[in-house]
Image (cartoon, rainbow, N blue to C red):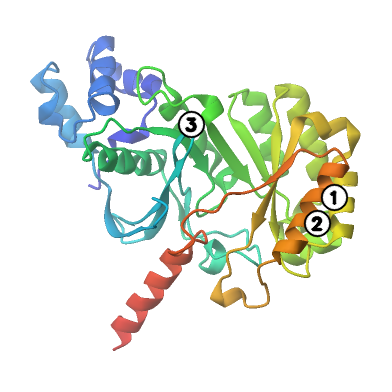
């Protein structure tokens, strides 16, 4: 029997699981404290939990369902972890250093079916969803790595923007959020967590109804249907009009700012007329609660039709939005001296291993 990750249960689920097996409610909180506050990596280290409970946990759960297959560290302190799962699949997790703290970008799926034409993550189709435990374990891998440095560093922010579409793995993603937000555990504040979606409209409505206080980012990347469909096939199912309706619903329900992610592709979506069209799309009613995150493109070999926008075009695009009253900024880049694009390290490593297998 393949054991599931101990990190995959919310505190409510862990409590219910133990109660159903005859253990007291307080045991769950004891285990929770050992997992996320003391961060032990073996059930035998839970010294105030009785032997019967520990034996039950040992029989059913594992601490480690993945290991670090490869690790790259950038000059700016960014660390990219290539993790090998128990079934042999590879995923990426990234630690980034900011002035405001340490942020981890997590992956939610093995591969991606969204198929954005500029993205390295979609080079390999989705083979499966990650469990909630596998998503949480990415955070724990990074935190345990930080713990070895003995300088009290902690993961303070999370972005759910790695490989995969988070809203295509909705239930596991929501359980992950509940686990990492828990104030008696990792205690990562909801407002320090951002979930990104390519625009799965029904799930945006569902996410809004949950009122999690977690930040939402929409991968927009184009100001009109024709262009967005050209570079993001998800737009065929959920065109911009339906997407913006769901955005309005989210804003009304949450009264929280939403971020539009916009990757600048040279000569494709980065001209002044695109900026004006984008400002018009956002409009005056959404202006106060929206922010546009302009992202310089990290080129991917397999997507050679796209190039990085010139700095002057980026400046003009930014200035045009600002003059139209749109809150915006240009994303600070991380890990430019390593495989910076999301999914790039994984794709390269899988190619290398295929070549070795043929040799």
Q: Which residue is mark 2?
A: 316
- Which quarter of the image is occupied by the C terminus? bottom left
Q: Quadrant of residue 253?
A: top right
At x 55%, y 76%, the residue is 301
Numbered mark located on residue 177 in the image: 3
Q: CA distance from mark 3 to mark 2?
A: 37 Å
Q: CA distance from mark 2 to mark 1?
A: 6 Å
Q: Which residue is mark 1?
A: 320
Q: Depth check: give the residue in front, 279 or 45.
A: 279
Confirm or deny contact between disc 2 and disc 1 (CB under 8 A). Answer: yes
Q: Is residue 222 visible?
A: no
- Residue 263 % position (x, y): 68, 57
Report the mark closest to the observer, 1 or 3. 1
- Residue 259 % position (x, y): 69, 39
Q: Earlier in the sequence, mark 3 or mark 2?
A: 3
Q: Secondary structure at mark 1?
A: helix
At x 58%, y 60%, the residue is 113
- Residue 140 % position (x, y): 32, 38
- Residue 214 % position (x, y): 58, 29
Q: Earlier in the sequence, mark 1 or mark 3?
A: 3
């Amino acid at each position: 029997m393949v054991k599931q990750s101990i990190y995959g249960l919310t505190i409510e689920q862990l409590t219910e699981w133990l109660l159903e097996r005859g253990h007291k409610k307080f045991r769950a909180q004891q285990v929770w404290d050992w997992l996320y506050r003391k961060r032990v990596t073996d059930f035998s280290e839970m010294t105030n939990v009785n032997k019967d409970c520990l034996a039950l946990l040992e029989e059913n759960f594992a601490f480690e369902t993945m290991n670090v297959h490869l690790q790259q560290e950038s000059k700016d302190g960014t660390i990219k972890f290539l993790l090998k799962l128990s079934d042999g699949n590879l995923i990426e997790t990234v630690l980034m250093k900011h002035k405001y703290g340490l942020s981890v970008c997590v992956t939610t799926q093995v591969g991606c079916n969204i198929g954005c034409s500029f993205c390295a993550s979609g080079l390999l189709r989705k083979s499966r969803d990650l469990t909630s435990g596998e998503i949480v374990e990415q955070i724990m891998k990074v935190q345990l790595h930080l713990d070895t440095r003995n300088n009290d560093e902690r993961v303070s922010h999370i972005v759910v923007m790695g490989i995969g579409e988070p809203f295509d793995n909705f239930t596991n993603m929501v359980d992950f959020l509940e686990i990492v937000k828990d104030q008696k555990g990792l205690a990562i504040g909801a407002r320090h967590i951002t979930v990104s979606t390519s625009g799965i409209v029904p799930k945006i409505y569902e996410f809004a109804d949950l009122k999690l206080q977690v930040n939402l980012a929409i991968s927009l990347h184009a100001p009109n249907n024709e262009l967005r469909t050209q570079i993001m096939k998800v737009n065929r199912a959920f065109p911009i009009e339906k997407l913006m309706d769901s955005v309005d619903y989210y804003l009304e329900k949450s009264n929280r700012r939403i971020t539009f992610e916009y990757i600048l592709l040279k000569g494709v979506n980065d001209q002044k007329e695109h900026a004006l069209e984008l400002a018009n799309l956002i409009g005056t009613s959404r202006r106060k609660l929206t922010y546009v995150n302009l992202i310089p493109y990290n080129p991917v070999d397999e997507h050679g039709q796209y190039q990085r926008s010139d700095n002057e075009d980026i400046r003009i695009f930014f200035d045009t939005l600002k003059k139209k009253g749109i809150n915006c900024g240009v994303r600070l880049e991380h890990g430019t001296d390593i495989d910076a694009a999301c999914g790039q390290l994984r794709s390269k490593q899988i190619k290398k291993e295929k070549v070795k297998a043929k040799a």
